[in-house]
């Protein structure tokens, strides 16, 4: 008998202990030994399943979703429910995604936080298409499979444990066979599956998921179905699912997960869900895998009392009196005094401590209200009630109608709630292009996760050592320019275009206290910081106490042409940009400079931009990075030119270029030569040369820092980098 204390799901519509694969095997004397080793699967609701999962078990689930586009929200809610309870579905294999060409469409709306999505286009049927959602606990690789006719679909992924020399932990296959194959085509499929499974080393864990459209409850009535099961069993595999996976008056067992190492199996079952007319099936395996190490970050106690004590301590030190007031003095000495005093006061009054980094596992969509969540729970209860009702019961049609009405209304309400939310967001940000793009990214579910990689390929081999990884990233980022410039042509010198120097002259002008305060006031509150651990927020707390000191140091730099050395050290964080996360060239560097460096750069940028705009030295065809110009204006001019050309019976031809590694490969010598051409005087050139040269950077990866590396070209990501590139061009 089935265990009714655990089996909380349906007990009608052919769902008896006699309509199960275990019962059929028990009746077959030739397969009686298989019956003795095969554990019966049960029906579970989500809470039942979660309660049985242990900390280090792994859940593999399979579902014929019947259109991922239509069921995207349902699947997202399903995965997030398990994430909420810290019992994630680690691998979700989907059949019938219905995607025809995933290379030509934006897949970001289907991404789910904490998961990687891998897809395969449909080709065996209009209702085909395969996908995997793979939890980011695991690294993975896509495994090539044996070529076969386009009569069914299959794909494989190898799950890799980065803590164990990147060894394959197990492999998961995903199959979809359309139901309308001919007898010969069905025989060909069965032969292929048997040959594929027989070639698998039984010491390697293998799990084959899918909708095979072969009813294993008909093995005594259909020779082909019996032959399919025999191929599975003879290859050393067992079925994890023994009860019907598609529920109707003639329920069938056409979905399954086949496995080859029974000792790894904790339990398996069929999940109570209404995502499609196929029930989700799952297997829970006992496997030790590498969980992400707990990440800690350094923070300072910044309550109001601590802030006030910190500010008063800075004030009491009378730092300005300790500085060398001579404008010709080296600004490095004065900056050393200021930096040391700030860090000392922070450590004294704003206690430094390490706290666990809180990465939310479940990010609730903002338009999902408590009322919607209650409606989802009501829908789930109605679904369970419907499936517990015998189809011959007079209440069945009524309950079915109630469920369909509620489900359809709920989907409409959720879509409307999402539309209303984003309509409001776009409206309130209509005058802020940056916020508009951020809102658009959220609406399209663009994944901006900045999680550090667990492993990367170094010299053809996977590496998980954070120190080695950090050094590899740093070496790559610091030498991008030399790699790029080695490919550039020297056929024509840039000097050929610098025909007549401008008669205007530029020198940096000394500033006063008010300019420093004005620049600091524009800093946005932020706790991010460079190598000195001084953030925007910290500087803004004491800007009136140190503004005279900073003004003096900036003026000393303008006079001597010396940019403080400590302001030229960048902390770099690698951010995944595209494609394979194991390849280092698919990452871009984000540089974090000291806050006071940004103050210098803002003031320098303001003076240089004023000089170039007032003397009309920038091209009128340049729209980026220039006040009162934008890419929208560039698009309007392009349209205007094209329309005018067509009105004159001309055919406009537009060429669009994207310069790869443009800012990283900027040549310092060319930039300085062009500045001379534009009238920059010796002191200004000396300061900008000091600003550009002698820079270094280090990469920080999950708290591990690389060795420092000198930077020989490129420009820092600050207020000067956009203007510098305009001048360079």
Image (cartoon, rainbow, N blue to C red):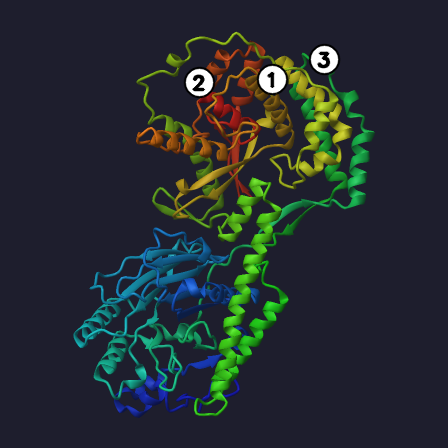
Left or right: where does residue 445 sit relative to residue 123? right
Q: Quadrant of residue 719?
A: top right
Q: Tell me where residue 668 appears, x and y as whole percent.
A: 47, 20
Upstream in sequence: badge 1 or badge 2: 1
Q: Nearer the viewer, residue 443 or 541?
A: 443
Give the SS element for disc 2: helix
Upstream in sequence: badge 2 or badge 3: 3
Left or right: where does residue 616 sit relative to residue 670? right
Q: Nearer the viewer, residue 409 or 105?
A: 409
Task: Please tell me the numbered disc located at residue 670.
Answer: 2
Q: Tell me where residue 311 appears, x and y as whole percent.
A: 79, 35
Residue 636, above or below 266: above
Upstream in sequence: badge 1 or badge 3: 3
Q: Are marks 1 and 2 in contact (CB under 8 Å)?
A: no
Q: Nearer the viewer, residue 427 or 692?
A: 427
Can residue 360 be seen by looking at this rendering?
no
Residue 265, above or below 315: below
Give the SS element for disc 1: loop
Q: Tell me where residue 416 appears, x and y as whole percent.
A: 55, 62
Q: Quadrant of residue 316?
A: top right
Residue 351, above or below 337: below
For the residues marked 1 and 3, what is the alpha-carbon distance in whole angstroms? 14 Å
Q: Which residue is mark 3?
A: 326
Q: Nearer the viewer, residue 385 or 236?
A: 385
Which class describes the residues within 10 Å of circle 1: few (<14), some (14-19), or many (20+)?
A: many
Q: Which residue is mark 1?
A: 562
Quarter containing the N terminus:
bottom left
For the residues marked 2 and 3, what is the alpha-carbon distance in whole angstroms? 33 Å
In front: label 2 or label 3: 2
Can residue 490 be seen by looking at this rendering?
yes
């Amino acid at each position: 008998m089935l265990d009714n204390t655990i089996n909380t799901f349906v007990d009608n519509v052919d769902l008896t202990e006699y309509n199960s694969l275990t019962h059929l095997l028990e009746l077959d004397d030739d397969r009686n030994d298989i019956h003795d080793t095969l554990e019966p699967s049960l029906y579970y609701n989500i809470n039942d399943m979660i309660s049985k999962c242990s900390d280090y078990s792994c859940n593999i689930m399979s579902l014929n979703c019947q259109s991922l586009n239509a069921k995207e929200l349902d699947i997202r809610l399903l995965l997030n429910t398990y994430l909420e309870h810290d019992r994630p579905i680690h691998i979700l294999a989907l059949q019938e995604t219905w995607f025809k060409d995933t290379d030509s469409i934006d897949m970001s709306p289907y991404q789910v936080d904490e998961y990687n999505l891998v897809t395969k286009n449909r080709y065996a049927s209009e209702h085909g298409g395969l996908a995997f959602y793979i939890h980011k606990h695991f690294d993975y690789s896509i495994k090539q499979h044996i070529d076969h006719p386009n009569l069914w679909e299959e794909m494989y992924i190898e799950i890799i444990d980065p803590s164990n020399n990147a060894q394959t932990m197990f492999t998961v296959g995903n199959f979809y066979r359309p139901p309308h194959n001919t007898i010969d085509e069905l025989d060909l499929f069965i032969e292929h599956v048997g040959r594929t499974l027989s070639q698998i080393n039984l010491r390697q864990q293998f799990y084959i998921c899918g909708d095979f459209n072969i009813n294993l409850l008909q093995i005594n009535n259909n020779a082909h179905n019996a032959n399919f099961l025999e191929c599975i069993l003879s290859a050393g595999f067992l079925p994890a699912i023994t009860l019907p996976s598609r529920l109707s008056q003639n329920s069938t067992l056409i979905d399954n997960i086949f496995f080859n190492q029974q000792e790894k199996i904790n339990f398996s079952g069929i999940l109570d869900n209404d995502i499609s007319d196929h029930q989700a099936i799952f297997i829970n395996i006992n496997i030790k895998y590498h969980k992400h190490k707990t990440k800690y970050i350094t923070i300072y106690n910044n309550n109001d009392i601590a802030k006030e004590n910190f500010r008063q301590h800075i004030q009491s030190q009378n730092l300005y009196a300790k500085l060398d007031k001579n404008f010709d003095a080296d600004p490095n000495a004065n900056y050393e005094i200021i930096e040391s005093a700030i860090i000392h006061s922070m450590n004294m009054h704003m206690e430094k401590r390490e706290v666990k980094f809180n990465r939310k596992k479940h990010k609730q969509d903002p338009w999902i209200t408590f009322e919607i969540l209650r409606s989802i729970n009501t829908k789930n209860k109605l679904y369970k009630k419907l499936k517990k009702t015998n189809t011959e019961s007079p209440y069945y049609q009524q309950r079915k109608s109630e469920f369909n009405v509620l489900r359809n209304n709920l989907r409409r309400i959720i879509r409307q709630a999402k539309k209303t939310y984003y309509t409001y967001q776009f409206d309130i940000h209509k005058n802020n292009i940056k916020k508009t793009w951020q809102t658009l990214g959220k609406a399209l579910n663009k994944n901006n996760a900045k999680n550090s990689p667990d492993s990367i390929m170094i010299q053809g081999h996977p590496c998980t050592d954070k120190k080695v990884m950090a050094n590899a990233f740093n070496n790559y980022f610091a030498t991008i320019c030399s790699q790029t410039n080695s490919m550039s042509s020297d056929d024509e010198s840039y000097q050929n275009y610098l025909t007549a120097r401008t008669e205007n002259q530029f020198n940096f002008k000394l500033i006063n206290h008010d300019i420093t305060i004005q620049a600091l006031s524009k800093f946005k509150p932020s706790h991010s910081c460079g190598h000195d651990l001084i953030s925007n927020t910290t500087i803004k707390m004491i800007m009136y106490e140190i503004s005279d000191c900073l003004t003096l140091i900036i003026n000393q730099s303008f006079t001597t042409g010396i940019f403080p050395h400590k302001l030229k050290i960048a902390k770099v964080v690698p951010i995944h940009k595209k494609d394979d996360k194991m390849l280092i060239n698919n990452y871009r560097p984000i540089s974090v400079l000291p806050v006071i460096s940004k103050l210098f750069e803002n003031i320098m940028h303001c003076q240089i931009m004023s000089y170039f705009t007032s003397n009309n030295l920038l091209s009128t065809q340049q729209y980026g990075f220039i006040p009162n110009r934008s890419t929208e204006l560039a698009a309007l001019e392009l349209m205007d030119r094209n329309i005018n050309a067509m009105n004159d019976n001309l055919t406009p031809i537009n060429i669009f270029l994207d310069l790869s590694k443009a800012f990283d490969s900027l040549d310092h010598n060319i930039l300085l030569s062009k500045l001379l051409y534009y009238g920059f005087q010796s002191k200004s050139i000396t300061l900008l040369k000091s600003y550009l040269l002698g820079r270094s950077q280090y990469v920080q990866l999950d708290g591990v820092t690389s060795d420092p590396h000198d930077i020989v070209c490129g420009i820092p990501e600050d207020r000067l980098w956009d203007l510098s590139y305009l001048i360079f061009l």
